[in-house]
Image: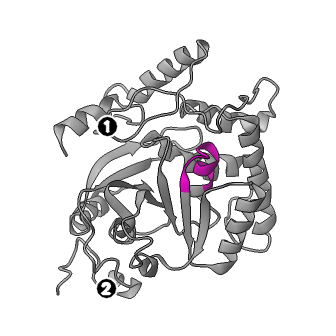
Amino acid sequence: MGEDWAEGAQTSQGGVKQEGTSSIERRHAKIASQTSQGKTKQEGDIQGGDRQDEIFQGGGKPRPYNTRNTDISLQPFLKGLSQLGLELTEQQLEQFLCYRQELLDWNKRINFTAITDPEEILIKHFLDSLSLLLVYGKPQTHLLDIGSGAGFPGLPLKIVYPQWQVTLIEATNKKVLFLRHAIDTLKLDDVVAVHGRAEELAHQRQYRARFDIVTARAVASLPSLLEYCAPFCRTGGFTILPKKGDLEEELAQGKRAARQAGAVLKDDVAVRLPGLDDGRRLLVWEQVKKCPAQFPRIGSVMAKKPLGKTSINE
């Protein structure tokens, strides 16, 4: 990891230092100061870790949501948004609440999630999805969400950044139907739900190396996730993978796998948000060169010969 990135990550808005004073605490103090002066911004990117302190606010020129008389059940969610520097509009909050209700209704027929408590959905699904903004917040971007399921993290990110282009890939048709229903119900533009398998779509020209940001919230090993994601990511783009738990061995193999797929680990950021301070991390991988054409391989081959562990030519 280059010195410029390492130094920038300690001072960036999104970065969280693993040791010493947390840079996010300094960021929150800055946000509070800016908010009192009525200032908002909406720009930022991973650029050698050099991001300015800022407040993101999507939706053009909307009226910020008034939190003074808000339902108390929303407070943990709104507190987490504040820590991310997000100020929702009334329309955006309504979209989140509508999204939650649709998820609960459809979950009775399709097993999307074991989390059915309305307050937990706001934290464990919506806020967790938005935690990616700790490391990336460019105003204009093309995001790919692989194995999107019920739309996490793609749809929550689309709600707060309506100008983003978002593509959701999902292999289960019933889930794709829900995603398309949610997109229509929430009146979201420039977002599409694609029915298909990532290992097949990644070899099609319209998807390969086309995206600025690729992410996957699926429970899988880092080598597998990187092999699925890297082919979709353009050179200079980023793959952001949420993880938690003891990752020492998996991360070592993941780094070797990344090199085979043309990527390198750029940052490892702790997530410290209300209800999510349980060892969650965001692993940021930069695509430094095109992913070799043979990737991704079919799932059975990935399982038999995972990247980072055995030679792909064996």
Front residue of 177 and 266: 177
Residue visible at 23% across and 70% down? 308
Toward which corner of the image does residue 178 lie, by quadrant?
A: bottom right
Q: Is residue 81 visible?
A: yes
- Horizontal arrangement in the rendering, residue 75 relative to residue 301 (left or right): right
Residue visible at 61% across and 65% down? 192
Residue visible at 20% across and 36% down? 4
Question: x%, y% of residue 205?
Answer: 40, 75
- The residue most toward the top is 37
- Horizontal arrangement in the rendering, residue 127 relative to residue 50 (left or right): right
Q: Secondary structure at mark 1?
A: loop
Mark 1 Cα within 10 Å, few/some/many (few <14, many 20+)? many
Q: Which residue is mark 1?
A: 49
Q: Which residues fall within the magenta stretch? A: 155-165
The residue type indicated by label 2 comes to Lys
The residue type indicated by label 1 comes to Gly
Of badges 2 and 1, the one in the foreground is 1
Does residue 40 sit above or below 150 in this rendering?
Answer: above
Q: Is residue 19 visible?
A: no
Front residue of 122 and 85: 85
Q: Secondary structure at mark 2?
A: helix
Front residue of 67 and 53: 53
Residues at marks 2 and 1, CA–CA distance in whole angstroms = 36 Å
**Is 110 one of the magenta-colored residues?**
no
Ranked by sequence position, the earlier of labels 2 and 1 is 1
Does residue 298 sit above or below 175 in this rendering?
Answer: below
**Is 163 one of the magenta-colored residues?**
yes
Question: x%, y% of residue 183?
Answer: 70, 60
Question: x%, y% of residue 185?
Answer: 78, 58
Residue visible at 34% across and 60% down? 234
| Disc number for residue 304 | 2
